[in-house]
Amino acid sequence: MRLLVLLAVLALAVTGCSGSDAARPGVLSAGLREPATLLPADVADSAGRLVTGALWTPLADYDAATGKLTPRAAESIESTDRVHWTVKLRPAAFHDGTPVTAQSYVDTWRAIAASRWAAAPVLTKLLRAREITASTPDTISLVLDRPSGQVPALLSAPGLVPLPASVLASHDWKGFAAAPVGNGPYRLDGAWRPGSGGTLKRVGSGQAEEIELRVGDPTAQYDAVKAGTLDLATEVPGEKHDAMHDDFDDGHHATWALPRAGYLAFPVANPRFADATVRHGFALGVDRAALEAGPLAHQVDPAKALLPPADAPGERSGTCRPCSFDAAAGKALLQQAAFPGGATVYFGPSTEAWTRTLVVGLHKSLDVSVTAQPLSGPPDGPSTLDVSLATASPYELLSTLATESGYTDEVFGQNLALADAAATPEESGELYRLAENQLLRDLPVAPLWSGHGHAVWSSRVHDVLTTPFAGPVLAGIGVS
């Protein structure tokens, strides 16, 4: 009997789930991986975004139902000249009871800009404000270094949420990440328990009274939802990808675009890759489906455009020829350009596994010698990129891709600047498409894949909506 009890306890420890807890009225149990951090300005992983998305309310975000940018903590974000911007705040308080003021944002953004956190480039490279002040307790005033219509999109970045005065004074970022205090619809009840999880208590407009976040193995969590001992699994492992559609009804699983994409960047200043014909030849030699089904384990989609769906300005139209796999055409282009043969593809720590598969495929399809090597200095051959986005503005990604490849073009730069300065989303979207099309023509980078997330949930769960940055929106999920 003792052995059976011990085995049962061990089983619960492995799955992080229990049958009785899953059915508590008003309580949602959700499985996730261990977040890398719960300091919102430094979050770059899906699990961290899931948790901080419930603990904080951003100034604005993209409505999960309509896809339109919608003010949240802000009452309005306005400008008459796109240089001077005014953000009016709704009344709000942190979970410790202190008020959220304009100064909270000013001081938080000053700390972020001075850091190396993931959100820092949003302020220093994208927003580029010459002056940010709290003109009144509920008004943030910004003066930019140039006209920009992208400010509402940039301020919707989940990393730009406010921090309470206590941590801004102490600078105890590690301690704060262990017991974060936000301004969102849920507060963390006690400290986060690494390897175990935490409990969220409703303090705002969330549907569930309580959310139990359970850290564990995605495969075990998937099986627990199927068995009815967990309400929601926020990740579906590759080996369960095909079974998901049979194991769960259409209304009980979802796939959504993530702000993440993979590319092959070419050193355009290197004479061997200066000819766009060569770059197109390599792009056509990539079997993206093999990457998706192999080392990327069904967690991505083969690229169909330069911009991933999470970052695309409006509806996509047309085809992406460099996104196709056409070994014969790729080989012919290299022959046409008299490519001398032989190339090294460089990789960083996050891209090694799929780069090695990519290299084997290129060697086979293009019949040229291709090897893989860790990146340790300026590359003399293509390099793989795994890009995680901090905002939903295409400016961030397009400028990053041009920088990574060393691509400079006057028309491209003008279109990017005009898109940034455009007065309306429609106008900026058209200009971003022009810039995107130019990159697809000149191809300093070849799009390979875009990330997506999966979730499955039990029959007692309803109203599951997802967004690229939050994944399943925990505050909107109901349990019966």
Image (cartoon, rainbow, N blue to C red):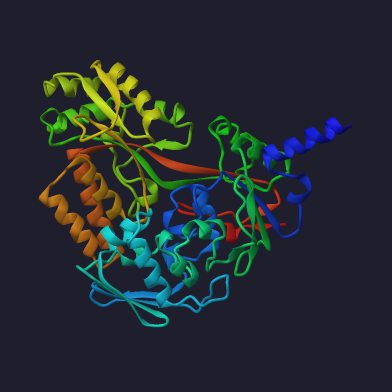
The percent position of residue 273, horizontal first and vertical second, equals 15, 30
The extreme bottom residue here reads: 136
Compared to 395, does 401 lie above or below? above
The percent position of residue 42, horizontal first and vertical second, equals 42, 54
Judge from the rendering whether residue 183 lies leftward or rightward of residue 286; answer left or right.
Answer: right
Judge from the rendering whether residue 390 lies leftward or rightward of residue 56; answer left or right.
Answer: left
Residue drawn 50% across and 66% down? 57
The extreme right residue here reads: 1
Q: Quadrant of residue 220?
A: top right
Q: Is residue 260 visible?
A: yes
Compared to 105, does 275 lie above or below? above
Residue drawn 62% across and 41% down? 216
Residue drawn 46% across and 60% down? 66
Residue nearer the viewer, 217 or 334: 217
Residue nearer the viewer, 28 or 32: 32
Q: Quadrant of the N terminus?
A: top right
Residue drawn 76% across and 58% down? 25
Judge from the rendering whether residue 46 lies leftward or rightward of residue 28; answer left or right.
Answer: left
Q: Is residue 71 visible?
A: no
Number of callouts in the render?
A: 0
Compared to 190, does 354 lie above or below? above
Q: Quadrant of residue 443?
A: top left
Q: Quadrant of the C terminus?
A: bottom right
Residue nearer the viewer, 452 or 356: 356
The percent position of residue 54, horizontal first and vertical second, equals 55, 60
The percent position of residue 160, horizontal first and vertical second, equals 40, 63
